[in-house]
Image (cartoon, rainbow, N blue to C red):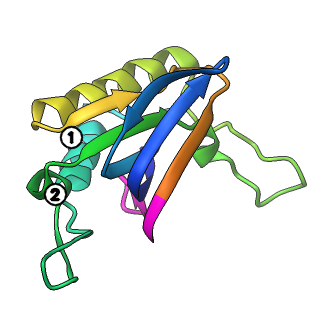
Amino acid sequence: MRAVLQRVKQASVTVDDKVVAEISQGLLILLGVAKEDTSKDIDYLANKVANLRIFQDDLGKMNLSLLEIGGEALVVSQFTLYGDCRKGRRPSFTAAAQPEKADEMYQEFIAALGRMGIKVKGGIFRAYMDVELVNDGPVTILLDSRKLF
């Protein structure tokens, strides 16, 4: 499971000219699910996201987590995080989970963050979405549950 975290002042998802989810201060999380992912990957990534100290404290130092600031999360499914561009000119997505599994794990990830006390919203799985954000910093972090980076 992979995630791109973007620290935001605000973010929203629009589908068919209708805002379907929006948050204020927190994280926009682009989430990709791999074929071999399990509930252990969800648990690892949800814990990492909730507790990663990437928000500024009173001294301007990255020292606070999403939980500590009471921030929100907006999770957007992003199978293209598993695009393999090493060969040819078109990405291969063979490592990405099939839609049924990906949707189930995407929903479970959202629920896991919610159980941790994070106010979390999601986009619409498999919809064509417009994602808007005001990046805070900017701060962008890459996570992989297999610890590949």
What is the number of the mark on residue 43? 1
> Does any portion of residue 9 appear in the rendered image?
yes
**Where residue 10 sits in the image (x, y, percent)?**
41, 48
Magenta-colored stretch includes residue 62: no
Give the vertical position of 118 relative to 5 (above or below): above
> Does any portion of residue 36 appear in the rendered image?
no
Q: For the residue labelled by badge 1, is the local secondary structure a helix, a strand or a loop?
A: helix
Dominant secondary structure, magenta: strand
Residue type, numbered disc 1: Asp
Residue type, numbered disc 2: Asn
N-terminal of the two: label 1 or label 2?
1
On the rendered image, what quadrant is the C terminus found in? bottom left
The residue positioned 63% from the left and 29% from the top of the image is 129
**Where residue 48 sits in the image (x, y, percent)?**
23, 55
Give the vertical position of 127 relative to 11 (above or below): above
The magenta-colored residue range is 135-149
